[in-house]
Image (cartoon, rainbow, N blue to C red):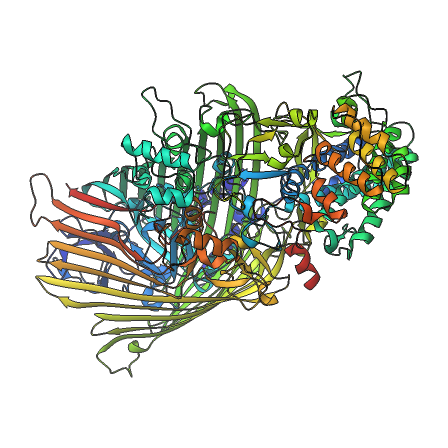
Amino acid sequence: MKFCFTRASMLLAAMLLLAAPAMAQYMVKGSVKDALGEPLIGVSILVKGTTTGTVSDFDGNYELNVPDGEQVAIFSYTGFKTQELTISPSTAQLDIVLEEDIARLDEVVVTGLASGVKRSNSGNAVATISSAELVGNTTPQTVDNALYGKLTGVNISANGGSPGGGVNVQLRGISTLGAGSSQPLYIIDGVYVNNSSIRNGRSQVSGATGGQSSATQDDAANRIADINPDDIERIEVLKGPSAAAVYGTRANSGVIIITTKKGKAGQTRVTFSQDVGIAQGQNFIGFDDWDEAKVDAFFGSPAEQAARQAAEQEGRVTDWEDFFYGETPLLLNTQIGVSGGSQKTQFYVSGSILSEDGIIENTGFDRYSVRANVDHRISDRIKVSLNSSYFKSDNDRGFTGNQNNTGGSIGYALAYTPSYANLLPDANGNYPDNPYFNDNPVAIRDLGINNQQVDRFISAATIDIDLYQSANSFLKFKVNGGVDYLSGNSLVYFPEILQHQRAQANPGDLMRGRQDDLNYNIQGFLNYNTNIGRINSNTSVGAVRLDQRGDFVLNRGRGLAGGQDNLAWATVVSSLEQTVTRVTDIGYVIQEDLNWEDKIAISAGIRFDKSTLNNFQDEFYAFPKFSGAVNLHNFDFWSIDVVSQLKVRAAYGETGGLPRFGVIYESLTPQLIGGQLGGQVGTRGVDPNLVPETAQEIELGIDLGLFDDNLFIEATYYNKGVNDLILDQQPAESTGILAIATNAADLENRGIELALSASPIRGQNFSWFTRIMYWQNRSEITRLSVPAFTQGGFGPSLGTYLLAEGFSPTTIVGTPAGQGSETLGFTVYGDRQPDFTMAWNNSFTIAKNLELNLVTQYQSGGNAINLSALLWDDGGTSPDWDGDDDGDETPNGLDRLLAWAADGNTGVYIEPTSYLKLREAALYYTFPDEIGVFKRLKVGVSANNVLLWTDYGSYDPEVSNFGTQSITGNIEVTPYPSARRLFFHLNAEF
Amino acid sequence: MNNIFYKLFIGVGIVAMVGLSSCDVDRVNDPNNPSLASVTADASKAELQVLVTGLEARNRGYVTNSAQMFGSFGREVYAFFGSDPRFLNDWLGLGGNAETYPDFFASGGTYVNPYLAVKQANVLISAANNSTQLTTEETFGYTGFAKTIKGFQLLWPLLQQFENGIRVDVEDPLNPGPTLGFDAALTEIRSILDEGFTDLDKAGGSFSFNLTAGFGDESDPDDVLYKNPTAMRQINRAIAARAALYAEDYGGALTALSESFMNLDAADAQDLLEGPTHVYGNAPDVNNPLFYPLDASTSTILIVHPRMIEDALPGDVRVTTKFAERVNNPITDASLNDVATSDPIVGAYQDARWTSNISPIPMIRNEELILIYAEAQARQGGDAVSAINTIRNIWEVGDYTGGTSTDELIDEILFQRRYSLWLEGHHWVDMRRLGRLNEIDTREGGTIYTQVERRVSEIAWDEG
């Protein structure tokens, strides 16, 4: 690869020589304001057909150097309609007012790896999110959970409430059945970024290794959490293959393209923001009181009765839920950004510190980030950009969720611990044993460590060269590449003094993980743009290469010296895992975009990809795409004035999904026995005919703008089929082969996405913008060439997922068995995916300075497997345990447990997940004038996840014990409760 | 325009070159593990050694589940594993659970794990047969050992599945053989053991591979070594005797025992322990899965069923050496109560057989062979009593004084097996083969299962 970069740099040097000097100029000055008369900062002003341009400064003023003669100046600004105005040497002053563009028709969206078109000409429904939408309301912890309720067709679900992320992002239904990547591909400034979840071994230490899922129960966050959301200028979401085809073999689950902020020429701007907030656990269960009758009913033991009375007399009866989850931690977020520059060089430099404690003591998430983005124009024809960033994440996620026989989960232990249990340490700091469970959760909270630290560098470089330019056409060359280096360290530690450790042969348990990941990618593209008659043609060709190198080591030490968490102080040290990963992808792309006077726009392209993850490592797979848009309102015959835009669009595209690393190998696994190292035949077989998964999508839509686009409706229908889905075929277990990755299924996702945006009121004193979204998706397995099977969870009696032809892949089944054979005899209880989702976003501006924003989301339908409720019933802690709703003199808790156990009815613990959430609420006041050194000062209050209405019987219907999963999410085992977050904000510019 | 297209053409060429052609991508092989193909094509002795040791490792996979689940089924123990109610609820069939279900809770240990050992044995057999680097005798050494272990392992899923039967021909993962009924499968297993016996006969005087201390510790002058074909044949016959007993072929059992390592003249407890073992160690080896520190405060522990204490003969040394009282930490579980009295069933005793978490666990041992001998003799009208007395005297419960009818002798042998072979995977199986499952104590109100339901993957394979 070194060799390749050398080649690239030689090529660049050659390109630089082609650059030519510039011509004579004149200057135009002016200002840019919005309809309310507010100056617009950072408006891009470009001389059409050239690369000459500038941006407006803090007061909305600009100075534009124009090449000789009459030209057209293009004024563009995100969120406003682009204007084109003719200028000549006699135009000294040009003041303009930009109109708001609620439909964002002028925004340039991606159609190719090196090309884009205005949204109004796009054949796809491309969703974008601006910085203001992402972080303008409140302070999100991570980028992915800032996307909630802001896009159609996107279902985002947190895995739990642990600080520091852990989110499942699902674009347009199901894209893989678990073998491929279920998460969208993230690209930041052209760099393929690592969004894996790094194992930390918590599940081994806490014993939570059971279950049928391939993922561990480590509760690790996916690493997009390292990215600072405040650095982001814009996010573009390619939801399905029709839009994402240009990303080829890794794009089956969609692509999320993130562009970070750039510097703007002009006066140097310093922005500073400070957020101060608190978090609060929400939706507490309210564990049952333990009175005399309850203790009798549950334990029936005089000793327990005595223990209860003793606790009562000593005044130590405790609401343990409130005790553990009732903290109101401080949340701090400080951002500072400096941007500015000259015509030639612009920079954006930022630094941030996010520090958030969790609602459980000793948990929290800190993130530090530094960024420098520099753009420099070497000559009229050559532009280079360098974006570099460093992040550090430090995450304490504590011990919640599943465990086995260790007590290493606060939530799990709570299920079995009555209010009168004696858990608090004595004056000497000795924690009493918990007679009700394997360990004392107070000791687990105070003494256990579950920490993960990640240091990360993401750097991108881009070189744009204008090779040739004429009145009618241009040829550009663009090289873009970058590196994502991630170094992770994790520590999971249970000291030797813990109750459950003392019950083991080697007390004290320690897990240290180390991850080194390096992604580097480079792409080179030629773009040739010309006008053929009245048709504009843009041709691009290019090549792409991605390399991934990973090395993960997890070591365990047991039998620790007192208080030591260093491996050298362990009696027994073992290497639990070392996994080295090496992957290379190579692709070629060719694409053609045609535009006939903004009336009809057509795009066609094809990408050829190969990857070493494939069984056939040298085979290229083709991913074509085709799309077209017809802007009826731009035709001369159009005469309906009220309809300002009517676009009919259609798109088709194909993408791929790669097998997971390792599934093409039949290997031995090491096992030591009696001092000899043996090789055990692995349980994985290989299908010699394995090919990548391929998805193809047809997307049809209409965009309708009314009343000068003040009311805008987007309607999209898609049909996304995924073929050759890779499944772990399970041969008869008696063969000793438990899984063979094979192309065994096809599935179909059909969906509708509707969005209505409007500015019903636009006045000097009050304006209101509203956006209502509705989306739904239906998934169905249309072919399954292996026998139907169940996956995920803890086996059928505790709820699992059925994979069978004719069923949704997210169908939840359980006992009793004895039903029809198409469900393997199991009873169908529902589907993880919702029937539909709606979001309603409103923003109000009052008297220019006061802004109120609300983001609301409603999910209808969907189910989850609530095993917390099972544990609460089993431990007697469920809130209504000793009630008797059916009057049969058996307590409710026991009734449910018996219905589950004796009647084998899993349905008792499968619950609907419909909810209504007020995701974000924010109120800001901007001071009208400069105050002292502050050019602009804004204060506000906001809240995140502020209100939740649901019938789901636990903390939050968004939950996944097995982490980020394509299918087998929505399984709950006493998770970290989710929290509402309340903030005070101060934003200043000077 | 020509100029442009010329540049375009050159540019495309350069881009393509940058991206790719100058840097071909080599095939990426598994960077983490040796491939299976490397040991099955023409394996060296070093590669075969890796497979042999791997087979020893797979050979111990059944131990945990045969003790915990078979032990719960036969009410030798209660699994007080507080984290999951199913260890009691499902394994004991509480609350009217009359049947097991496909993929029954935590039952893979006596099904999937033994078949992993069978897979390993099959790979070893084919690797040895495909190797050109071995003499014929050496090859038979590998195959004889592999078939012996394979026969031993196949018994576990058969005992779990009983009348559901099992597959024996499992070499091709995508084309497995039929599911054979109990008798047919047992016949196949016995013939695999016989093949192993014949192979070992042709294997010369020594193995060309090493085994762990589980087959004899060279550093201990008193230890019996099974690390040669002759001694391995004695293990093979011990397993064959167990299989013959299950097949009710008592003559066959006695023949097999005569060629096994059985020692009817056992004089002390140590003599009864004689036999191969599964060895354990600290990580990265595996700990003895049945070891629990004595009397620790925990809600996760195997508890001796109270009837083992209640039914014990006075002075039985087995009771004092195998069971330890939990003096400070007796344990109860809210879901485990005596249905007659409604009182909690107190877990007062735990397994005391292991001195540490690296103690070896017997694979098959002399005490069982003596009891098989006694049972076969009783069935054939021979002298069972002297073998019974050998056992009784070592454990200090005096000579047998009961009746000598076959039924009375079987009663006595069953009783001795219950104490002598406690938690070694026998009692539930014994009660079933003798038709006495209904005699098992169900004070907790549970169900005694006859067998475990077929697994989902097996059903699905047959239906698909």
Judge whether residue A183 can be spotted in this image: no
Tell whether A163 sits left or right of A940.
right
Tell whether A136 sits left or right of A391.
left
Judge whether residue A656 can be spotted in this image: yes
Name the residue nearer the viewer: B417 or A602: B417
- Give the quadrant of residue A499: top left
Name the residue nearer the viewer: A385 or A948: A948
| Residue A937 percent coordinates (x, y) | 12, 45
Q: Is residue B197 above or below residue A947?
A: above
| Residue A378 percent coordinates (x, y) | 33, 43
> Residue at left 28%, top 81%?
A636
| Residue A842 percent coordinates (x, y) | 21, 61
The quarter of the rendered structure image containing the C terminus of chain B is bottom right
Tell whether B56 sits left or right of A724.
right
- Number of labels in the image equals 0
Q: Is residue A416 above or below residue A435?
A: below
> Residue at left 14%, top 63%?
A767
| Residue B401 percent coordinates (x, y) | 80, 31
Name the residue nearer the viewer: A204 or B231: B231
- Give the quadrant of residue A119: bottom left
The quarter of the rendered structure image containing the N terminus of chain B is bottom left
- Give the quadrant of residue A318: top left
